[in-house]
Image: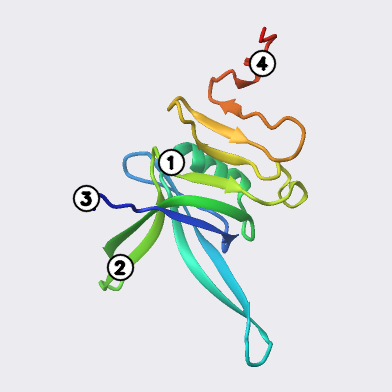
Amino acid sequence: MSGSVNKVILVGNLGRDPEVRTMPSGDKMVSFSLATTESWRDKNTGERKDKTEWHNVVIFNENLGRVAEQFCRKGSKIYVEGQLQTREYTDKDNNQRRVTEVVLQRFRGELTLLDSRNSRGGEEGASFERGASGGGYAARGGGGGDRRPAAVGGGRAADLDDDIPF
């Protein structure tokens, strides 16, 4: 096999509110922790057991970062699609550290809000991702009614079904 794949898909709950930082270049970076929990019943005791894994998520994509900043809060259930990246740094005590993060790059990645309308105050199942045409980001809602994608950033998706003759 000549190629490789680095793709991570997680569905979980935010462990803290998203933190927004500005890099020296002026670009924004959004980070948060995401908990995924596996549940099962112990075969011997019949007792329900849980195991929670914590994942560090970093968003470099401006539009997805804005969505996370505005709509995601501690406890929010989200779907994230990104890549694993490991980086090294020196902490304040001069110790070398390594951290592995799920990264949503500037032109890649997906973030879908899975909370219900009542718990978040927005669309149920709203999805924000890079459009396939490369011309902006599409927001999709699963809250019933019209399920067509609505363009964000200059598109005219709502006008596409005007009196089509066929």
Residue on which the image places disc 1: 61
Among the 4 quarters of the image, the one containing residue 141: top right
Q: Which of marks 1 and 4 is in front?
A: 4
| Residue that label 2 marks | 98
- Cβ atoms under marks 3 and 2 closer than 8 Å: no
- Of labels 3 and 1, earlier in sequence is 3
Amino acid type for the residue under numbered disc 2 = Arg
Q: Label 3 to label 2, Cα distance in Å?
A: 28 Å
Of the image marks 3 and 4, the number of the one nearer the N terminus: 3
Dot 3 or dot 2: first in sequence order is 3
Q: Which amino acid does label 3 sit on?
A: Ser
Q: In this view, does 84 lie above or below 159?
A: below
- x and y percentages locating residue 7 in the rendered image: 39, 53
Q: Distance between the residues labelled 3 and 4?
A: 44 Å
Of circles 3 and 2, which is in front?
3
Toward the viewer: 156 or 118?
Answer: 156
Give the x, y percent position of residue 29: 42, 47
Mark-to-mark CA distance, 4 and 2: 51 Å
- Quick one: label 4, few (<14), some, or many (20+) residues within 10 Å? few
Query: On the image, numbered disc 4 is attached to which residue?
Result: 161
Classify mark 1: helix, strand or loop. Answer: loop
**Residue 153 image offset from top left, x and y in percent:** 53, 25
